[in-house]
Every structure is written in C-alpha cells, then in structure tokens.
Amino acid sequence: MLLLSLFLLSCLPSAEASNVGDSLIVGIQSTKTTAIRPLEPKERDIVSIYDLLYDGLVTIDDNYLPQPNLAESWESNSSGNTWTFRLRKGVTFSDGSPLTAQDVVATLQYILDRANDEAATDHGYYVNLKYFVSSVSAKDEQTVVIKTKRKYWGILYAMTFPILPAEHVQSDNPPGTGAYVVTNFQPASYIWLQANENWWQTRPKVKEITVVCHATPGDVVESYEYARVDTIFTRSIAAAQHKSGSASLAMDYRTNQLEVLLMNHSAEPLGSLNVRKAIRYAIDVDKLANSIYMGMVDRTDTPVIPGTWMYNDTLSSYFATDIEAAKKLLEEDGWYDSNEDGFLDRVNSKGELETLSLTLHVYEEPDNNVRLEVANSIAASLAVVGIDCTVSTITFAAMDEKLTAGAFDLALAAYAMDVCPDYGFMLMSGNTGNYVRYRSTAMTDLCKELRTCMDQGSYTHTLHRIQTKFAEDCPFICLYYRSGTVLTRRMYTTVRDVRELELLRGIDTFHED
C-alpha cells in the first residue's frame, strides 16, 4: 500500500500549496536508525519524529519559555535545590497504561546511570542531565521530586526529555504519551505513524503520517522535487530555489548548530584583545551569511539565540565591520607593513622581524560543502587589514584533537548547543568547551551567578550582562546559527518558532479552518 501510494503520488503534477488533510508524507534523511529508541536517537531528523510520539514533563513554547506538559505544575523549595513536579491526572501511554511518577523516575534514572557510567563510550543523547540532577524519587503516584546539583531556574529546560513506561525504558518502540504511535517501521525505508487513540489531548485531525527515509540530503530534495513526498526538512542550500515556488510553502527553522570563529588566546598574537577585536572588525559576517549561505542562517553576535527574550540587542556597535578601526587596533599593538609586502610585521623579543601570520583550520561536513568557502572568504578579509592567513582543511577528528590540545591559531567550527540557555561550558575558565583558553574572573562569576537565578527576570538580566562582557572581551567570534527549511505542499502548523528537533510541532493541533 505504501509503495503504491508513493508511486501514484509521484505521477501527479505539482498542485498549489494547501492545508494538510488527514494524512501527510514526510521525507527525511535516515540510514542509521534501526530501532525506535527515543532516549538514544542516532540521527537529527528522527528526533522530530520522536517528538510526536513522546512527551516530556515540560515543553518550550514559541517564546522559548518552559510551559507545563506532562507535569501540570512545579515548585522549588526555599533553597532552590529541590523541585517538585505534579503530573497531570488521566494521562495514559499509547498502550493504555497510566502515567505515574514511577515512570518518570525510571526514565530519568536510566538516563543518569548511562550518563555517569565511566566505562561507557556513549553516554547518551541526554547526557547533560547529569550536570543538573543529583537524584530523583516518587513522593506518590502523581508527584516527582528531583534534587538538583545547584539552585537554578534553567533546570526546567532540561525537563523536556521523553518519558517512557518504567518497564520499557530499554525497549524498542516503547509506548509513549504523544499524539502518534508507530504502527510499522522498516529501517532506512519508512516509518508509519497513526494517531494515538489514547492521547490525553484532542485526537489529531491528521490521522496518519508516513515518514520516508532517504540516504542523502540530495535524495531528500529530489524526492520533494518529484512530488514523492509532501514535506521535507533540509539544510541544503540547493533547497533555496524552491522557496518561491507557488506549489511550496517554506518555513525557515533555526538549528542548534552555532558556527564560530575560534581564536586561541594562548597562541601569539591572539592573546591580545586588540588583535582579536581587529579580526572581528575585519570580517563582514552579513556578507558571508548572504553570499555563501544564501541567507540560510540566523545571524548572531553572541552565543545567545537571536530574536528571543534572552538576546541582548543593544551591542551592535561592538560587532560592526570597520576596516579602518581594525587597522588602527593593529597599529596600536605595533604591527606595521615595514617591508611593504602587503602584510603587517613587527620586531619580536629576539630582535627578529615577524609577520602577522595565522593558520585557519577548517573541517567539512558531509552535507555542508560551503564551510571551506567561508574560511577562504575570512582569510581574504584578514588580508585586507594586513594579516597573512593560511587556510588548512583537516578532518573532523583532527580538528577535535587540535581544539582539545589548544594546537591552533584560528578554527572555523561549530557548537551543538543544548536546549538549556546556559553558556558557561564555553565561557568559564577551564571548562571543556572553552577551547580558546579564555580566562576572565568576571565572566566566570557571571556564569556562576546565572546558575543561581531562580526566575526569568534575574536570568534575563544576568544573560544580558554575560553578552556585554562577551562583546567587551571578544573571546571568539559568533557568526550565525545554521538554519534549515521545511518545504511543504501541505501546511500543517501555525507555530511561530519552528526549530530543529521539533519540526512537526503543531501538527497535532492544526485545524484547516
């Protein structure tokens, strides 16, 4: 039936974009997922499918704020290190069994055990929970008590992990509390979802979703071009050509991939704030975003998600492109083109003339062939202000080694950002993600302060101060969050914040009217 449906659909001419009916065919990239394991997703697109099958205690709304989901309410104690979550009554899993506090405890304990297993090579997708949670217990059938490692409002963002029945936390295709259930799954071929008869909310009008798996990003786009699927998720720049078609609706979405230019403070002359700021002034990030990425990025000057309540939008003067300002800062550090070869130089402590030369390391992703182009453009921009920059393409593994060892000058790389808006891992002195060896007592103190905030107001205030300090110290350069596009012939959602890992969010409540 599936193959016949796909064949018939492929023979139809493109139609005008319209609202979804009672079914949808979605194309994704998936070759590694051999079992439905929501706590251990293997691929990016699969997480958006899991989002329809499983719910967390908390959900994140269009304003990027935590809202009740399976937990109808929560509260913390006076010291802020114990949180009590009260579950909704009447919620059942797709097999009809009731949701209880013991299910939450078993799910979270499984995640923590794996995350803390020193012998394990893979600590799981939700490994970051170990930094938040010290213990979990059930007070009664409807009440979960979570003791945290710190007094912290941000813990709510970590409570979005999928809840499974206690006896099925290690099972394939476990029952969930989400809007849909998997009724048929053929790895690397298709996943067939049907509306969950036992869902705790109003039954979705879209009764079935067929997910067709493809081997490569190009295959996904081709499948859409030939109308074999209604909807695709793609980060391919080639998909931009479909955005203006009358038969397609395009929804841009933000990914969690923050592209950055890392500058190693322990490598001369990048320990100088003047040099780092000069590099920042020299690079036209808007040009990179528009000419190379074709606008398929979300520009940001700080690690914080742009366009949200968290973002400090008063700092634009720090990040403007200014070639003359860059040259002036370098002159202040004693860099001149004394031999008129086009590059700056100065006499070092040994009395030798040294050129301002840097190596920019870059790695390519299988589905991203433009990062090298960005690196070459950055090198050209640095040459304009007199910096001799050589681009070196290396493997991802080699890049990881260089970043960990601090054996680099410049590196064009990306952070996979967590759902929790906390940037201490990359900014606090000595932390694992602080590859640039940035050291600031003031910044470390601000990050620690953020981790004691117990409400949105204080959290916002502290985040804004962190971003101001980031602008002043220029530890590294934030370029943009990568974005992607949902291309669809059938509109299925009205959510404002379309974001990676939740790309079908809203289909369960969508109404044609």
Image: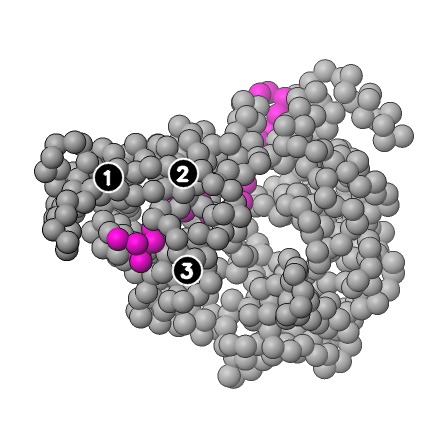
Whether residue 90 is visible here, answered yes or no, is no
Asked if 332 appears above or below 133 in the picture, the reply is: above
Q: Secondary structure at mark 2?
A: strand
Instruction: Residue 250: name its quadrant.
Output: top right
Tag shown at residue 392 = 2
Give the mark nearer the N terminus: 1 vs 2: 1
Give the mark nearer the N terminus: 3 vs 1: 1
Query: Does the magenta segment cover residue 299?
Result: no
Give the mark nearer the N terminus: 3 vs 2: 2
Q: Quadrant of the C terminus?
A: top right
Q: Position of residue 445 (x, y in %)?
A: 35, 72
Give the distance between the C-alpha atoms of the residues marked 1 and 2, in whole angstroms.
Answer: 16 Å
Q: Residue at x 44, y 41 (%)?
A: 362
Mark 3, residue position: 434
Q: Position of residue 140 (x, y in %)?
A: 75, 80
Asked if 55 appears above or below 236 in the picture, the reply is: below
Query: Does the magenta segment cover residue 245?
Result: yes
Q: Of residues 263 and 260, which is closer to you in this image?
A: 263
Closer mark to the observer between disc 3 and disc 2: 2
Q: Quadrant of the N terminus?
A: top right
The amino acid marked with disc number 2 is Ser
Q: What's the magenta region?
A: 243-268
